Amino acid sequence: MPVKTIIQTVRDTLHEEMARDETIMILGEDVGLAGGVFGATKGLQAEFGEMRVMDTPLAESVIIGAAIGAALNGLKPIPEIQFADFILPAFDQVVSEAARMRYRSNGTWNVPMVMRVPWGGGIHGALYHSQSVEAFFAHVPGLKVVVPSDPYDTAGLLRSAIDDPDPVMFMEHKKTYRLVKGEVPDGDRYTVPIGKAEVKREGTDVSVFAYGLMLYNSLQAADALAAQGVSAEVVDLRSLQPLDRDTILESVRKTGKALIVYEDNLTGGFGAEIAATIAQEAFDSLDAPVRRLAGPDVPAMPYAHTLEDQFLPDIEKIATEIRLLAEY
Amino acid sequence: MATTDQDLTTATSMEDRHTPLGLSEEDLKRMYYTMVLARSLDERMWILNRQGKVAFVISGQGQEGAQVGSAYALRPDKDFFLPYYRDLTVALTAGMTARDLMLALFAKAEDPASGGRQMPGHYGHRAHNVVSGSSPIATQIPHAVGIAMAAQIKGEDTVAAVYFGEAATSKGDFHEGLNFAGVLKAPVVFICENNRYAISVPEKKQMSVQNVADRALGYGFPGVITDGNDVLDVYKAAKTAVDRARAGEGPTLIECKTYRIVPHSSDDDESRYRQKVEVEEWKQKGPIERMRQYLRGQGILTEDLEKNIQARVMEEVNDATEYADKAPYPEPDTLTKHVFAERS
C-alpha cells in the first residue's frame, strides 16, 4: 500500500474525484495555474481546464458565494480558502447563506459544497496564517465541520464530504500536510463516515481527545508515557459537527479521566463543548476533573518562534497533563 | 438607455413603443395584470397587518414597473430569479401565485418559500427557479454569479437575474460579485431598483456618484439607466441585457430609477425621514398609472377590461387571503427538520 503525506492525499483524492464526477469544480486563490500555495491542486487545471479549476480574484466572500450559486445550479463546487484566517470576509456567506439554505427553504434548496480550509499553527505563520477557526463554524447548525488528521482519513472523509448533500467545511491542518504520513489504499474508493470519531490508540488510564496537529502530538505523548507505565487512550474526533458523543463517552466511561487538547485559544473553544458533554453525560464515571489543554487567551499566534512555541501545546505539555490526571 | 433622471415623466406619448420590442398586446395585458395584482396583494397585506392578523409586512409598492419590466425578459422555470425582499412582482412574474405569497405572509406550513420559517418577503420557489433569499442585503449577488458560472461550465444557456436596492450597492458582496462576473463574462443581469432610500438614508448619503449604473464602469460591462417607472423602458434594457448574457457577451448592470411609496416595513415611520408631499408626487408618476395611461392611449385598455381586471384581481386577492388564513401552521415538532438532509 502506498505511503503518502496528507497534502499528497488531498491532491490525489481531488484528482480522482474530478475524473470520476464532472460536476465537481474547484475555485479559489492560486488554485489553477499555481496549483495552490500548498500544492493541493497541482496539475489539476492542466488536466481539467480553467473552468473546472478556476483561479478567482482575492475575494473570499464571492469565492464562497459563487460556490453556493454553483451548487444551487447543480454543480459540486470545492472552494479553497487559502488560509483559514482569511475566511472571515466570507463568514456571512458561510453562516447566513450556505448553512441556512436548506432550513430556510424548508428543505427545497440545498448547498452541496466542500469548503477546503487549511488551518492551524506551528508553521511560522503568525497572527494571520495560523488560526484555528473551528469553534466559529462548529457552532453553526446546517454546516458540517470535518478535521482529518492522517492520510487515510483525509481521503475517506474528503470523499464523504463530496458525497454529502450539505455544506461541509473540510479543515486540513497545515503543519500536518507534510509531517504526517500514512498508508492510503490505491484504487479503492473507500469512505470514512462524517460524524464518527476513532480511537487511534487504546489505553486504560486517561482519555485524550484531540484533532489536527494536537492529535499527532497527543499520540507522541502517549507513546512516551507508555514507557513510564501510563496508559493513555487517544481519540481522534475527526468530525466536530456532527460530534460523535457516543465514542467520547464510551472512552471516558472506560478510563474515568478526560483531557481535551486543542490549539485554539482556551475560552469558548471547541474543547468546552466536549468538556460539557462529558460533565453532563458521564459525571458518574469520572475519577478526576475534566481538563483542557489549549492555546492561551491571546488574540492569535505570534511570529517569533519563542512565542509560537509558547503558544502551542507540544508533546511535553500534553504528557505533563496526562501524567497529572493519571496520578490524580 | 439614454433616459436620465429628469426625463422620468416624459414617456407618455402615444406612439406604439411595444411592438418594436417584440411585445404583443397580450404581453402588455399580462404585465399590467401582474402589477395590479401585486399592488392589491401588497395593500391587502398592510390591512392584515393593521388588523393585527399578521406580524410583519415589507413591500415594494411603487417598484412594480421595474420588477415586471425586467422579470418579463427572462424565461420562467428555466432562467434563475434571485429577488430581494421588495420583489413581490418579480415573484409573481416568475410563476409564484397570490396564494404562495399570502401563505408566506401568514407563515403557514404550505408556504413554498420557507414553510413559514422566514419573515414575509423572503421569496423562493424551487420549481420556478426562484432562489431562497435572506435578510442581509447583497448576499444573493455572489449566488447569481455562481449560478451563471455553473451555466457556463455546463454549457447551458441559463441566465441569472439578481435583484437588489441601491443600498446593496454599498456592500462588499456587490463589488465582489460584479467584479468576478465581469472577469468571467458570466450570463447574469444585475437589476438595481433604486428606490432612493436605504430605509431612512437618502441616496446622496449612500454614494457620491450620481447613478448606480456608473459603477459598472469599474467592472468592464455596460451600466444602463432606465426609467424604473416605465415598464417598457425597463423591459427594453432587460431584454437587451438578457440577450447579451445568453449570447455569451457578459453581464449588464441595469439601474431602475424608481421610488418606494410606502414605508420600509410595517414597523417603519417614514415621517421621520421624508415629506408627505414627496411621496405624493411619486405616487402620481407611479408605474401602474403610467402603464394604464399608455394602454389607454394604445386602445388596449378599455373601461370594460379595466373593470374586468380589477374584479379578477380582487377575486384572486380574496381567495389567496382566505386560503392562507385557513391553512394550518407548521407543526411545532417540525422545528428541527431540514437542518441537514434526512438520511434514509
Image: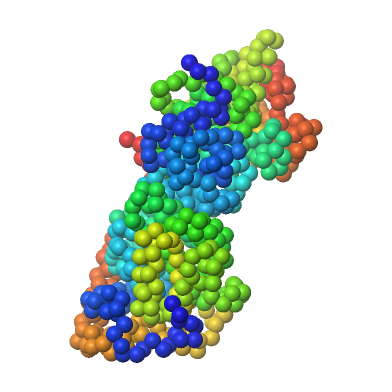
Q: Is residue B121 visible from the viewing direction of this image?
A: no
* A284 vs B44: above or below: above
* A301 vs B180: above or below: above
Q: Quick check: A100 left or right of B235?
A: right
Across the whole image, how many numbered discs are drawn on residues? 0
* A155 vs B157: above or below: above
The x, y position of residue A115, in whole percent, is: 51, 41
**Which residue sits at x=50%, y=26%?**
A153
Nearer to us in this view, B225 or B309: B225
Q: Is residue A66 visible from the viewing direction of this image?
A: yes
Q: Quick check: B37 left or right of B192?
A: left
* B288 vs A55: above or below: below
The x, y position of residue B337, in whole percent, is: 38, 45
Residue B92 quadrant: bottom left
The x, y position of residue B260, in whole percent, is: 46, 77
**Which residue sits at x=43%, y=52%?**
B149
Nearer to us in this view, B62 or A73: A73
Residue B111 quadrant: bottom left
The x, y position of residue A245, in whole percent, is: 50, 30
Q: Quick check: B67 left or right of A264?
A: left
**Which residue sits at x=29%, y=78%?**
B20
